[in-house]
Every structure is written in C-alpha cells, then in structure tokens.
Image: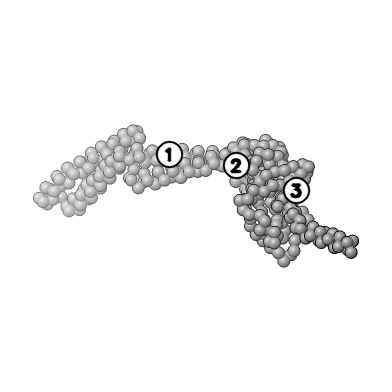
C-alpha cells in the first residue's frame, strides 16, 4: 500500500515538472550586409584618356577618377572665342559710333555738299528776278530749281549721317549688338562647362568597386564609368514574414552576429520596416516562408558605423530576437 502511494506521489511530481513552461527560445533571422551604391556617369561623349583609380581604392569627394579626351570641345572653344571677339567689336562700334577717320571724311563730305547747296541757292535767287522780268524761259528756271532742291537734300542727308556717326548707332541697334555679345558670352561659358567634363570627379567619399571602361573606349553621355559604395553607409537587411514581424519594432535596439567572423556580435538599431512587393527582393538565403504570408523588409543600422564598414558586402548576418 505504501509502495503504491509513493508511486502515485512520484507520478504527480513528474507531471508537475513537465507542466512547467520552458523559457522561450531566441528567434533568429538571416539577412545580408548592404551598402548604399553610387554610380559615376559622363555628361558628354568622349574617349577614356586615363584612369586614375583602381578597384578597392577609397577616394574623397572631388577627387579625379578619370580623364576624357574630347577634341570637339577644343574646336568649339576656338569658335566661341572668335564669335565673342566679333560681337564685342560690333557692340563697341554701335555704342561709340564712327572712328575719328570716318568722322573726318563725313565732315569733308558735309562741307562739300554745303558749298554746292549755297551755290544752288544763290543761283535760284538770281533767276527769280530774271523770271519776273521775263528775261529767261520757265524751263530754265525749273531746271535750276530742281538742281537746287537736289543739292539741299544731299546736304541735309550728309548732316544727319554725320550727327548719327558722332553720337553712335540708334538705341535699338545698340540693344541688338548687346544681345549678340551676351549670346557669344553664353556660348563661351557653355564650352567652359564642357571642358570641365573632361575630368570625371568623385561626387562623394566612396570606395571604388567597379571600373566599366578601359583606356581608349568611348564613354557616351550617361554611361556608368565607375561604380562604388558610399563611405560609412553599411546597413543590414532582413526579410521577415508577417507572423513574426511584430517581434521587430522600429527604433528598438537589436543584436546581430556575423557567421564568417566566428559569429562576432554587432549591436544595431531598427530604422525601417516596410512591406516587400516582390518575392525576389528577399534577403534570406534559404527562405521557408509560407507563400500566403506577406514579407517585410527590416533595415538595421549599426551603432558603430566605422566597425561595420569593415564587413564584406553581401555576406550573411543573423538577427537575434528574444
């Protein structure tokens, strides 16, 4: 009887132990090490003259990455400079008027025509008296009067020409000449901008990952010559199904491990949680998600950006959630 009672108590004890809750195991998600990419492209067409960097180099913003050979720019520069000199001369002529030599010639012309006009005026005055006394025919008077009017008009025209040459061209002509000059200056500025495109510069501090052209090859406008990653832009990307995404909250601190570095621990913070629109965008190497569940991308920023910058891109990283 005592033996049965002891067996019963032992069974109850074992049952009670088995009913105790086990501590919840950590949840682990696999992801990838990522970096913000940047691509350097050309604005004008040109052949690669020289490449000044190599894959793996780190450059600062403004460093020269490559040189382009653009012979058309040199030709256009000469044309633009010539057009600017011509337009500048035209404008100065319109503003300042005729030269001193031209003014001397015009004054001599005016003086000569004034002599002719004075002679014709005196002649027609004498003929007026003769015509009143009927000493000359009307035809001769009319011929002399026509010559008088012609001399007068030529004299007045020469005076106007001299006055215009003395004070410069009319306002509208000056404005037109100024517009031609500004247009030529714009062409020169445009060529100078194109000349600067010979130098392919780094837009930001970046590491060089790929060089897509070799010396002598043609780079067309918009062609990606060099690709790389931005400085201190390392982050971690995970794909988590909707039934587990509640375990990861934006702004929470998390702990990660890097398998290829013997599970080295890295601390980070969740900065973004967004839905994935395509199954191909997942970051998990061997997904076993239910196809009926929506997937979410979780972006984790490392607390130590300098330490994280030493990690290899696209390597695996694990996110541990308790």
State which quadrant residue 98 falls in: top left
User: Mark 1 or mark 3, which is nearer the start of the sequence?
Assistant: 1
Mark 2 lies on residue: 203
Which structural element holds mark 3? Answer: strand
User: Mark 1 or mark 2, which is nearer the start of the sequence?
Assistant: 1
Percent position of residue 125, x then y:
15, 45
Look at the image and tell me in which quarter the N terminus lies.
bottom right
Mark 1 lies on residue: 88
Q: Is residue 198 above or below residue 6?
A: above
- The residue shown at (84%, 59%) is 10
Front: mark 3 or 1? 3
The front one of 204 and 322 is 322
Mark 3 and mark 2: span between their CA atoms? 29 Å
Q: Which numbered marker is on residue 316?
A: 3
Give yes or no for contact between labels 3 and 2 (Cβ–Cβ under 8 Å). Answer: no
Percent position of residue 123, x then y:
18, 44
Q: How is the image coloured?
A: one colour
- The residue shown at (74%, 55%) is 24
Q: Is residue 310 above or below residue 34?
A: above
Q: Is residue 3 above or below residue 177?
A: below
The front one of 61 and 124 is 61
């Amino acid at each position: 009887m005592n033996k049965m009672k002891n067996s019963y108590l032992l069974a109850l004890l074992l049952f009670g132990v088995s009913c105790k809750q086990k501590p919840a195991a950590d949840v682990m998600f696999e992801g990838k090490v990522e970096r913000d990419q940047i691509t350097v492209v050309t604005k004008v067409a040109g052949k690669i003259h020289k490449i000044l960097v190599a894959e793996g180099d780190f450059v600062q913003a403004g460093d020269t990455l490559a040189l382009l050979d653009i012979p058309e720019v040199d030709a256009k520069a000469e044309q633009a400079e010539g057009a600017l000199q011509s337009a500048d001369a035209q404008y100065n002529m319109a503003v300042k008027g005729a030269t001193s030599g031209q003014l001397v010639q015009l004054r001599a012309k005016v003086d000569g025509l004034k002599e002719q006009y004075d002679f014709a005026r005196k002649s027609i005055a004498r003929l007026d008296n003769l015509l009143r006394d009927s000493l000359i025919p009307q035809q001769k008077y009319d011929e002399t009067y026509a010559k008088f009017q012609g001399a007068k008009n030529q004299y007045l025209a020469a005076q106007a020409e001299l006055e215009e040459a003395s004070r410069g061209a009319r306002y509208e002509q000056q404005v037109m000449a100024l517009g031609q000059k500004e247009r030529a200056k714009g062409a020169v500025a445009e060529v100078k901008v194109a000349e600067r495109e010979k130098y392919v510069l780094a837009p930001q501090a970046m590491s060089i990952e790929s060089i897509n052209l070799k010396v002598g090859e043609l780079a067309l406008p918009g062609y990606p010559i060099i690709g790389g990653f931005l400085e201190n832009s390392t982050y971690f990307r995970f794909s988590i199904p909707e039934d587990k995404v509640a375990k990861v909250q934006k702004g929470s601190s998390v702990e990660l491990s890097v398998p290829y570095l013997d599970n080295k621990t890295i601390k980070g913070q969740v900065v973004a949680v967004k839905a994935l629109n395509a199954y191909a965008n997942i970051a998990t190497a061997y997904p076993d998600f239910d196809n009926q569940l929506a997937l979410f991308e979780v972006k984790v920023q490392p607390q130590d950006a300098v330490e994280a910058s030493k990690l290899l891109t696209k390597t695996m990283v694990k996110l541990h959630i308790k």
